[in-house]
């Protein structure tokens, strides 16, 4: 009896020890595997860092390609050292993301709030970065005194004129390009029904350009919009509007293609090229002004590669058009981007990840710039033969 009991206990004990040993060995093996994976990742990171130091910063490649490369910037983020470092290292143009919009800069009739824009522009100047001012006339981010204002047409005209002359005048000679009018055309090609249209009428567009030009004759003045990058009802309407303004002698120098796109719905590059061509034929400069390529989160590796291809294709189109002179993204790190809060379930739209590490899109952009340089110097050599 006792013997049987001992045998049973012994067997149970043996099984427990067996399991325990099994777990222990498995634990050690998993730990070893993890350690190995860890080592491989850190080796890979070192290799990437080495490759990265071998590639010149985007801005120096872009300069040699005679194009600006840039990003939209927020004042508060300039206090973050990684952010400020990457910005000054990689880009030679920036756009004020929110600081110069009507609401933030002109919160009440007699008060302007220039601190954020001043700070960003000082930063840009001390690092040899050009500034795109964004934006003087838009239907969003307006202060309450505008949204709920009741004025006569003449008063509305004076309000807009004073706003433009004050803001543009303050930075005279310091802002390279202004998005004077933003998103004035609706998706169906008609002029958007906004506060300016309702109270001033369609003339608000040409007036805005004329006042901005008076306040800073050197600044390049842009019409900027989304969904008008390729061909279609909206881009035809933008084209016709600008053509008509030019014929009237309105000082408008460029068109901004915002280029907020997604991996599922990429722009048609041939159409973008054709649109840039017809705008260039009007004598206009073209800037890609707000590019981001959103993906569903969490991003899969293949989406990031597809995203890189989309950035590459648009940059290629821009580089091959003589009048396309800037390639600006709406931010640069996935840590700070408007996408997650405006497009639910989407993110990872920019070229650096949340830890400021370059993503595939960064390398594709660098590669396109390098290829462009190589081709250009090859062409040059042919010319001298
Ligand atoms: C966005 C900013 O990125 C956000 O921070 C803000 O809350 C809303 O506006 N088109 C434009 C930009 O012209 O001004 C918008 O910027 C993005 C869409």
Image: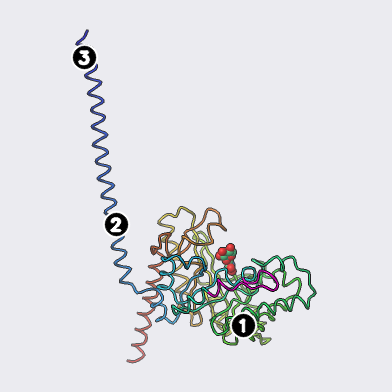
Which residue was labeled with disc 1? Answer: 169
**Distance in Å between CA atoms under marks 1 and 3:** 97 Å
- Camera-nearest residue between 100 and 282: 100
Image x and y of residue 53, in percent: 31, 70
Of the residues under marks 2 and 1, which one precedes in the sequence?
A: 2
- Camera-nearest residue between 239 and 109: 109
Image x and y of residue 323, in percent: 51, 82
Q: Decide if residue 370 is in sight here.
A: yes
- Relative to 231, is 110 on the left or the right? right
Image x and y of residue 160, in percent: 70, 76
- Camera-nearest residue between 62 and 232: 62
Q: Nearer the viewer, mark 1 or mark 3?
A: 1
Q: Is mark 1 within 8 Å of ligand 1?
A: no
Mark linked to residue 42: 2
Give the residues in magenta.
105-118
Callout 3: SS:
helix
Of the residues under marks 1 and 3, which one precedes in the sequence?
A: 3
**Is residue 37 a member of the stretch shown in magenta?**
no
| Residue 343 in which image quadrant | bottom right
**Is residue 107 a member of the stretch shown in magenta?**
yes
The residue at the far right in this view is 152
Ligand 1 located in image quadrant? bottom right
- Looking at the image, what colour scheme do you see? rainbow
Q: Decide if residue 227 is in sight here.
A: no
Which residue was labeled with disc 3? Answer: 6
- Tell me the residue at 51%/66% (across/down): 76
Q: Nearer the viewer, mark 2 or mark 1?
A: 1
Image x and y of residue 183, in percent: 63, 70
| Residue 128 in which image quadrant | bottom left
Q: Main secondary structure of the magenta part?
A: loop
Q: How crowded is mark 3: few (under 14 residues within 10 Å), some or many (20 or more)?
A: few
């Amino acid at each position: 009896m006792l013997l049987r009991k001992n045998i049973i206990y012994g067997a149970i004990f043996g099984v427990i020890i067996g399991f325990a040993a099994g777990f222990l060995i498995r634990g050690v093996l998993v730990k070893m595997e993890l350690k190995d994976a860890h080592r491989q990742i850190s080796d890979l990171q070192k290799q990437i860092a080495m490759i990265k130091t071998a590639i010149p910063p985007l801005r120096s490649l872009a300069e040699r390609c005679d194009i600006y490369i840039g990003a939209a910037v927020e004042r508060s983020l300039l206090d973050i050292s990684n952010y400020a470092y990457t910005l000054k290292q990689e880009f030679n143009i920036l756009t004020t993301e929110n600081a110069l919009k009507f609401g933030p800069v002109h919160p009440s009739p007699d008060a302007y709030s220039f601190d954020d824009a001043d700070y960003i522009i000082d930063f840009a100047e001390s690092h040899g970065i050009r500034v795109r001012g964004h934006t003087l006339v838009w239907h969003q981010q307006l202060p309450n005194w505008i949204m709920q204002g009741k004025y006569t047409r003449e008063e509305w005209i004076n309000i807009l004129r004073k706003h433009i002359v004050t803001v543009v005048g303050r930075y005279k000679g310091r802002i390279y390009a202004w998005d004077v009018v933003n998103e004035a055309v609706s998706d169906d090609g008609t002029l958007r029904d906004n506060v300016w249209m309702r109270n001033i009428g369609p003339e608000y567009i040409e007036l805005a350009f004329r006042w901005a030009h008076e306040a800073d004759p050197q600044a390049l003045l842009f019409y900027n919009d989304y969904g008008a990058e390729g061909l279609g009802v909206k881009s035809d309407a933008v084209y016709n509007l600008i053509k008509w303004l030019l014929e009237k002698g309105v000082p408008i120098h460029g068109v901004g293609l915002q280029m907020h796109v997604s991996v599922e719905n990429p722009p048609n590059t041939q159409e973008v090229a054709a649109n840039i061509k017809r705008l260039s034929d009007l004598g206009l400069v073209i800037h890609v002004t707000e590019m981001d390529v959103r993906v569903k989160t969490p991003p899969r590796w293949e989406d990031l590669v597809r995203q890189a291809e989309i950035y590459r294709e648009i940059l290629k189109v821009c580089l091959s058009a003589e009048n396309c002179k800037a390639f600006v993204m709406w931010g640069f790190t996935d840590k700070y981007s408007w996408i997650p809060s405006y497009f639910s379930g989407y993110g990872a739209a920019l070229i650096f990840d949340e830890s400021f590490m370059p993503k595939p899109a960064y390398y594709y952009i660098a590669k396109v710039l390098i290829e462009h340089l190589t081709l250009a110097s090859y062409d040059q050599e042919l010319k001298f033969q």
